[in-house]
Amino acid sequence: MIGVGALITGAMLGGGRRAEAESAQPFLTAVPAPGARIESAELQGNRILMRLSGGEGDELVIVDANSGRLLGRVKLGP
């Protein structure tokens, strides 16, 4: 009985991980920045921090690495 219970528990836990891995889909996102170029980009936890220059001045752009959702923009002063 204990062995059967362990098998059922293992199947339930393993199935949850598989479903979680299958639900992670690649994303495509666009960050509007006319005339700007990426000076640097780095990953910090589940955030992507990009420094852009040109166009309308320098700014930092923060994007969620899991969903591609734009989280914020910080304009850098002179």
Image (cartoon, rainbow, N blue to C red):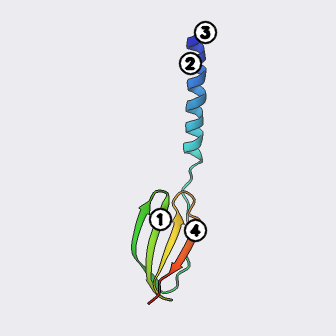
Q: Residue at x 56, y 79 (%)?
A: 32
Q: In terms of sequence position, does the residue under pointer 2 or pointer 1 come before the other?
A: 2
Q: Is residue 62 or residue 16 the one in the foreground?
A: 62
Density class for disc 4 (Cα within 10 Å; few <14, some 14-19, many ≥20) is few
Residue denoted by label 2:
6
Residue denoted by label 1:
48
Q: Amino acid at mark 4?
A: Leu
**Quadrant of the image for the C terminus?**
bottom left
Say what secondary structure mark 1 lies in.
strand
The answer for how far apart the CA atoms under marks 3 and 2 are is 9 Å
The answer for how far apart the CA atoms under marks 4 and 3 are is 50 Å
- Where residue 53 appears, as percent x and y from the top left, is 43, 83
Residue denoted by label 4:
71
Q: Amino acid at mark 2?
A: Ala
The answer for how far apart the CA atoms under marks 2 and 4 are is 42 Å
Q: Residue furthest top?
A: 1
Say what secondary structure mark 4 lies in.
strand
Q: Residue at x 46, y 57 (%)?
A: 45
Say what secondary structure mark 3 lies in.
loop
